[in-house]
């Protein structure tokens, strides 16, 4: 049986980023840039004023000197009239510096008369100017392929007039639940029936990771139903199934996938919960067969499918960052398995303090709802005393926020 790390590395080795597409600038937010972007022109495009004030020749300037105002250059205007000796041009922020001028004196450092301006201070050459290309030179690489596009990157793209942006495609993720006991949302379950919650748990996690869920519904525990729905699922970019992957006599997922040409890479991982997890590939399409208990489904999605999805979307950082926290109570686990313990983390004086969030039985969904992190306890070891330093995966982004 593979260890958690071995299994996850194997998954990530097999996954290749999807193809790319060009999308409208705003639709690129949160996506991963697929090509380097270079500046089509210098930024700023020309020397311009950084302040509202007067464009002057610094050599003419001294405290008390009065200059004649011979031009007016508001933002959006340009002037080719040179500023000559003893003169100044009234200029607004962003307007190009006229020929002859080599500095700007802000209004705050002048007193204005009728067609004149009197200076209060020394003026240094280059003062309050923004120089051609001081931000970015023409042809500079401003964004490298692989960059995740946030507001700053979108701003840079807009400055380069990139109306269409090359990004990695969004994976279509087919989601299939299996089991004769399952009933669809909108039904009140009768004795022996279970509402299909996994489809929604997986679809929600796919959306949050940036993928597009494609819901296939429920495969019944017969060969026909599995065959038709699994083959449908293999048309997507990635297929996630839940349940029917243990050794039960009606667990048909693995055999049917094999029949459809999926090459199984592993079955069973030394983890708890989620041990029966299977992973296979058909061509470039990864197939994750997750165990059916909702808690196992969600945890194996988090630890295996989410990193795979992020890699397909072109991300280079795909694993949840592991942070260290202090255990507030003793925890016991089975030796020989990496344990994912549902936990509640608080931040005190900059440290993460972790408590178990409740019953760890995989049938208990409520504990998952009350958790904001997973404790990752290593394969070896079975007793972790209060005060131990442990690894955590933070599931809730609000842990990084303050009220
Ligand atoms: P299995 O792996 O098929 O034995 O399923 C394990 C457990 O997970 C059973 O108790 C199932 O009822 C439950 N389960 C399976 N699929 C789902 C689902 N789609 N939604 C909620 N619970 C499920
Ligand atoms: Mg089943």
Image (cartoon, helix red, strand yellow):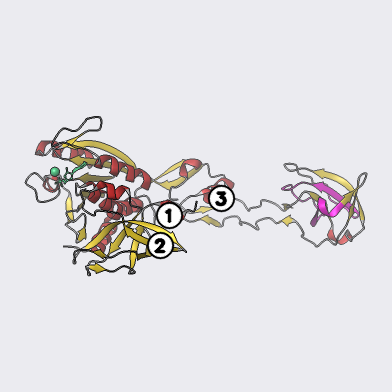
| Quarter of the image that includes the N terminus | bottom left
Are the residues flagged by discs 1 and 2 in contact, CB closer than 8 Å?
A: yes
Question: Residue 37: x and y, percent?
Answer: 51, 52
**Mark 1 Cα-neighbour bin, 10 Å: few <14, some 14–19, many ≥20:** some
Q: Tell whether 291 sits left or right of 45.
A: left
Q: Residue at x 63, y 57 (%)?
A: 135
Q: Nearer the viewer, residue 119 or 290?
A: 290
Q: Is residue 399 magenta?
A: no
Residue 106 forms part of the magenta stretch: yes
Tally of numbered tags: 3
> How many C-alpha atoms fall within 10 Å of the one at disc 2: few (<14), some, or many (≥20)?
many
Name which residue lies at 22% across and 40% down: 176
Specify whether 59 is left or right of 300.
right
Q: Which residue lies most toward the left here?
A: 249
Q: Dot 2 corresponds to which residue?
A: 352
Label placed on residue 273 = none
Would you place residue 111 above or below residue 183 in this image?
below
Q: Secondary structure at mark 1?
A: helix
Q: At which x and y percent is residue 92?
A: 76, 46
Residue 317 appears in the figure: no
Residue 33: percent from the left, percent from the top? 45, 50
Mark 3 crowd level (few <14, some 14–19, many ≥20, 10 Å Cα): some
Distance in Å between CA atoms under marks 1 and 2: 9 Å
- Which residue is identified by label 3? 156
Tell me the mark number nearer the camera, choosing from 3 and 2: 2
Relative depth, front residue between 301 and 210: 301
Where does the magenta region start and end?
81-110
| Ligand 1 quarter of the rendering | top left
Residue that badge 1 annotates:
399
């Amino acid at each position: 049986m593979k260890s958690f790390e071995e299994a996850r590395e194997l998954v990530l080795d097999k996954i290749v980023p999807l193809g790319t597409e060009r999308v409208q600038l705003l639709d690129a937010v949160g996506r991963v840039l697929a090509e380097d972007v270079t500046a089509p022109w210098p930024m700023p495009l020309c020397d311009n004023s950084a302040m509202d004030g007067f464009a002057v020749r610094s050599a003419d300037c001294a405290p008390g000197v009065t200059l004649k105002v011979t031009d007016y250059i508001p933002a959006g205007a340009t002037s080719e009239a040179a500023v000559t000796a003893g003169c100044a041009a009234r200029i607004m922020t962003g307007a190009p510096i006229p020929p002859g001028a080599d500095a700007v004196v802000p209004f705050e450092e002048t007193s204005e008369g009728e067609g004149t301006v009197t200076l209060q201070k020394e003026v240094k050459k280059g003062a309050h100017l923004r120089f051609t290309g001081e931000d970015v030179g023409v042809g500079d690489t401003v964004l490298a392929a692989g960059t995740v596009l946030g507001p700053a990157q979108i701003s840079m793209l807009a400055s380069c007039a990139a109306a269409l942006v090359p990004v990695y495609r969004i994976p279509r993720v087919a989601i299939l639940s299996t089991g004769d006991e399952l009933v669809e949302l909108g039904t009140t379950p009768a004795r022996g029936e279970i509402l299909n919650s996994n489809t929604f748990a997986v679809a929600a996690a796919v959306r949050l990771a940036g993928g597009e869920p494609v819901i296939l519904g429920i495969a019944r525990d017969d060969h026909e139903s599995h065959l038709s729905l699994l083959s449908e699922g293999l048309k997507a970019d990635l297929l996630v199934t839940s349940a029917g992957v243990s050794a039960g006599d009606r667990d048909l997922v693995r055999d049917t996938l094999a029949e459809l040409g999926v090459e199984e890479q592993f079955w069973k991982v030394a983890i708890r919960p989620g041990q029966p997890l299977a992973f296979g590939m058909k061509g470039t399409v990864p197939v994750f067969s997750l165990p059916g208990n909702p808690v196992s489904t969600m945890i194996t999605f988090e630890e295996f499918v989410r990193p795979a999805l992020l890699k397909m979307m072109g991300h280079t950082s795909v694993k949840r960052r592991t942070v260290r926290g202090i255990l507030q109570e003793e925890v016991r686990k089975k030796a020989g398995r990496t344990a994912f313990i549902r936990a509640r983390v608080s931040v005190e004086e900059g440290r993460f303090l972790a408590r178990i969030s409740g019953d760890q039985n995989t049938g208990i969904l409520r504990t998952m709802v009350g958790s904001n992190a997973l404790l990752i306890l290593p394969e070896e070891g079975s007793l972790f005393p209060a005060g131990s330093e442990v690894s955590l995966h933070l599931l809730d982004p609000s842990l990084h926020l303050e009220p």
